[in-house]
Image (cartoon, rainbow, N blue to C red):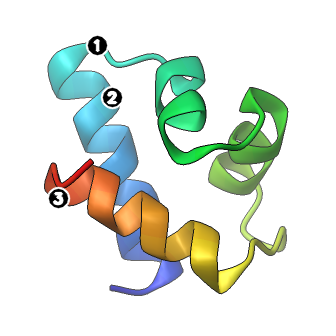
Amino acid sequence: MNDKQLREALFSLQKRFGTPITFIANSVGVSREHLSRWLHNESYVISDSLKTNLKQFAKGEM
């Protein structure tokens, strides 16, 4: 899953369940500002470990 697909999965999850960015950020251990910046800015880079955590969250494994 590349960055674009991961962003789309998180936005879809957010829209489907009304999950706030704050809840997602707290679940993966980052600040809301950091996650929001990455979601809305394609040139913003996050660590591979955070991407792994976000993928697990999007798949419902967290």
For label 2, the crowd category at 10 Å Cα-Cα, with few meaning under 14, some 14 to 19 and many 20 or more, is: some
Q: Which mark is residue 18?
A: 1
For label 3, the crowd category at 10 Å Cα-Cα, with few meaning under 14, some 14 to 19 and many 20 or more, is: few
Q: Nearer the viewer, residue 16 or 52?
A: 52
Q: Nearer the viewer, residue 47 or 11?
A: 47
At a point 64% along the width and 43% down the height, the residue shown is 29
Q: Which residue is mark 3?
A: 59
Residue 34: quarter of image: top right
In the image, what residue type sits under mark 2? Gln
Q: Nearer the viewer, residue 8 or 51?
A: 51
The quadrant of the image that shows the N terminus is: bottom left
Compared with 29, 22 (above or below) is: above
Q: Are marks 2 and 3 in contact (CB under 8 Å)?
A: no
Compared with 23, 49 (above or below) is: below
Q: Are marks 1 and 2 in contact (CB under 8 Å)?
A: yes
Secondary structure at badge 1 equals loop
Secondary structure at badge 3 equals helix
All told, the count of numbered labels is: 3
At a point 44% along the width and 59% down the height, the residue shown is 54
In the image, what residue type sits under mark 3? Lys
